[in-house]
Image (cartoon, rainbow, N blue to C red):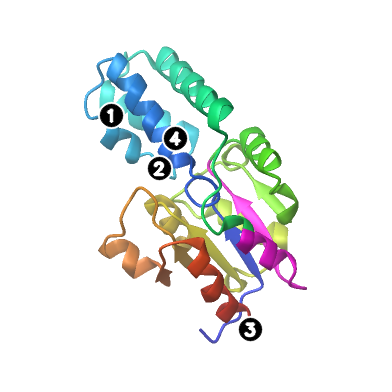
Amino acid sequence: MSQKIQSVIFDMDGVIFDSERLYANACAAVGEQFGMKDIENVSKSCIGLNERKTYARFKEAYGEDYPEEEFWNAVRAHIRAEKAANGLPVKQGARELLQYLWRIKGITAALASSTATPLVMQNLEQAGLDKYFDVIIGGDQIRHGKPAPDIFLRAAALLRREVQDCAVVEDSYNGVRAAHNAGMTVIMIPDLLPPDDEMRAKAAVILPSLTEARDYIQKLIY
């Protein structure tokens, strides 16, 4: 812990927002209507993947001829209805941690999500969180999605930081792999996927929530 960090890079879904659960519930509800077996495990296997890789994973599971357009239109409609009714819940400790970092001179923050940029911006603006990020990157800006390190390397470049100066907060296996492959300090906050041996080896620390992450990040900064 001798290396002090100067920037913190956050994933969005499952880290800032409790949106992985919303996505999983939508896939389960729509998948049941379409008679798609094992939909829960298939949808969980896509956590941390960008849209292109997610579509490919579903085709691998259900065949090239499954009703792709109808399925995803129904999933998106389900999510929109849920967000309209209840909003997109912010994860415990997220707002407080972002406010804390925002007040520290010389510390910058980025958001690096596999979700497409317009939806990322919409979610952040609706929650009033966009102002806390110096850099915001969506999965549509990156050719190779997680677990490739590209999105985190791009974030570091835009922040003008070396990789060793950055910590990444992630919840997904693919996100942890990507941050580890980028050579950054990895803080895992598990959401739907419990940590396994690989995650324990790749993450510098595994914590139950962003509330505990604040104390850990404070030690990395000072």
**Residue 97 visible from this viewpoint:** yes
Q: Nearer the viewer, mark 4 or mark 2?
A: 4
* Left or right of 90 on screen, residue 148: left
Indicate the amino acid at tag 2. Ile
Q: Earlier in the sequence, mark 4 or mark 2?
A: 4
Label 1 packing within 10 angstroms: few (<14), some (14-19), many (20+)? many
Q: Which mark is residue 159?
A: none
Q: Distance between the residues labelled 4 and 2?
A: 12 Å
State the image coordinates of residue 206 (x, y, percent, origin top left).
39, 67
State the image coordinates of residue 100 (x, y, percent, origin top left).
67, 67
Residue where numbered disc 4 is placed: 22
Q: Do the residues labelled 3 and 2 touch (CB within 8 Å)?
A: no
**Residue 183 visible from this viewpoint:** no
- Please state the total of marks drawn on the protein image: 4
Taking the magenta stretch, the answer to whether it contains residue 109 is yes
* Left or right of 22 on screen, residue 67: left
* Left or right of 58 on screen, residue 163: right
Residue plotted at (48% across, 17% down): 73
Secondary structure under tag 1 reads helix
* Extreme residue toward the bottom, this view: 2
Residue stretch in magenta? 96-114
Q: How far apart are marks 1 and 3 (CA)?
A: 45 Å
Q: Earlier in the sequence, mark 1 or mark 3?
A: 1
Quarter holding the C terminus? Answer: bottom right
Residue where numbered disc 3 is placed: 222
Label 4 packing within 10 angstroms: few (<14), some (14-19), many (20+)? some
Residue where numbered disc 1 is placed: 39
Secondary structure under tag 2 reads loop
Residue where numbered disc 2 is placed: 47
Q: How far apart are marks 2 and 1 (CA)?
A: 13 Å
